[in-house]
Image (cartoon, grey):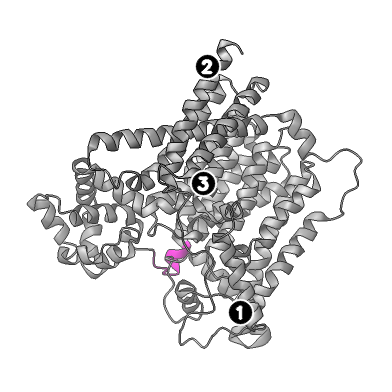
Amino acid sequence: MNTNTKLLILLNSVESFFTTWAFMKAGRMEPGNILTGAVFLLSFFLYRHISIRLSVKPFVYTKNGRRTAIFLSALFTFLYVIVDYPHYIETLTNHFFQAIVLSAVFLGFFVCFYKLLLLLFSYSGDKETLKVLLYAPEGRRKIRHLPMLCFFLCLLCWLPYFLYQYPGIMTPDSINQFEQVLGMIPYSNHHPFVHTMLIRLCYRIGFLFTSDMVTAISFYTFFQMCFLAFSVFYLVETLDLYQIRQEILLLVTAFYAFVPYHAVFSVTLWKDIPFAAALLIFSCSMLRMGRQVQRAAVAAFVLSGIILCLFRSNGWYGFLFCVPFLLYYYRGRKKIMYPAVIGIVLVSSIVRYPVMNSLHVTQPDLIESLSVPTQQIAKVICSDRELAPEDISLIESVVDMSHIKNLYNPTFADNMKELVRAGNPDYLAAHKGDFFRLWLKLGIQYPADYLDAYVNQTYGYWYPDSFYPVADGEGISASDLGVSHTPLIGGPVIVKFKEISLKLGSMVPLYSLLWSMGIAFWFLLFCVGNAFVRREKAKLVYYLPSLALFLTVMLATPVATDFRYVYFMVFSIPFYLMTAVIVPE
């Protein structure tokens, strides 16, 4: 055994020690727990294997690969530790020992993520091996019309949920939109006006043929199911154009057909569902045009882009963020793509402003987009920080400060928003500059409070170990509209099957990763890093819309753990992973 090998073994031992320390704290294990020894041995032999593998895969251990792994490892470690760290030091009072423990845990997680990323990059960056594993051999017999079969498989698997939840799941948000459909309340863009009009169109068609409100609502629900299934069809067909093996295409379809929250969401009347489908279609159209610009792909690009801009407010701002990058990326095809990109912006602008204004559609109020800064200011007040008299006067011009401590919820901003609406929101709108300066001033004075408030407000979307209910919607919320849950199938067997299928996501290891918003974000970050490792930076444009939309959620989310707000990201997981390993032509 030469000196280099001995040093490497010593280094792997030290790395395994800190990794064990990190897992001990994260797993709430006592130091004497036998599992700490098991973690150490597993870490040591894993790191030895990785060291050996990297020696035969030199394309990974380049400066570019190491830098990417270092950056992502530091980011993943920070995202994990910033939420969980209070548990690591809860029994310590001495700041010196707290610093030692936190440093050791940070180092342990960093080493773990760094090694694992290098290992994953050694597989995802091995293009020659991937060609053999991913691409169908020439002359191999294929299943005819596989994308269409995948479309019908999704509908078939979702059908029991449609029949059980007939005519669809309607929460208070859905009821509000249905009241607009019936003309009971004025039109509002708080829930996207265009989505409301789509519900109205399907409802009117259904009512024309059936004269029954419940059945008429089901027309929209079934349309939404078909649109969601079409987006899966479009993804499978896109991957089929790249000659991906059909076994993999069936595995991709299984994610949509058999993971039950897709079935539940397919029959839930929320704008987030068609929005997620539109993002997948938009992303796939760009992937198709990476091979060849075709009219059908351009049409899908434009139509799905308009839906993105009109079906959620953050979709509009996310797309505007993407515009300069899209124009740069498509500069070589400007005759076709520039009119497409600009056309999306123009059509969306016309609908959002002159059309909605002419129809007297009410826009969301200002406070709706200020969830994060409102929570941060409330956190400062609840922490009894010192405020200048003029700052107190400014705040009290809008809200009664005596209610803030009782109503403040670190993970839910609606309490603060309703307090503002009950106060003087017009004053806030008229003095936006003053409140911006107040927010900035308090942030400089009390950055720890701001960071704590922001983490509590957003952690569910980027922290991979938080629990929250997923797809727990049921029936139709109580109202006097004359519609109610009218199941076409039922009984204890159906009910129990639904309960078990949804509970498995919080019980079964590995499978439960598909139920985590934070993991979906980490998947996306890994794919972005993989594009750098493989020197395929052109692929970054495929992830750009998702990253832009995620950023808008991080800037304005009203609740820390609402799965539907980033359902678009979870729905696109197969697209991210497949795009990461596809070899460009």
CA separation in Å, label 1 and label 2: 67 Å
x and y, in percent, of residue 576 in the image = 62, 44
Q: Which residue is mark 1?
A: 167
Q: Amino acid at mark 3?
A: Phe
The magenta region covers: 355-363
Q: Which residue is mark 3?
A: 521
x and y, in percent, of residue 151 in the image = 74, 61
Q: Looking at the picture, does residue 124 appear above or below residue 346?
A: above
Is label 3 in contact with label 2 (beta carbons under 8 Å)?
A: no
Q: Amino acid at mark 2?
A: Leu
- In the rendered structure, does residue 356 fall within the stretch colored magenta? yes
**Nearer the viewer's eye, disc 1 or disc 3?**
3
Q: Amino acid at mark 1?
A: Pro
- In the rendered structure, does residue 210 fall within the stretch colored magenta? no
Is label 1 in contact with label 3 (beta carbons under 8 Å)?
A: no
* Numbered badge on residue 7: 2
**Nearer the viewer's eye, disc 3 or disc 2?**
2
Q: Quadrant of the N terminus?
A: top right
x and y, in percent, of residue 114 in the image = 51, 31
Is tag 1's residue or tag 2's residue first in the polypeptide sequence? 2
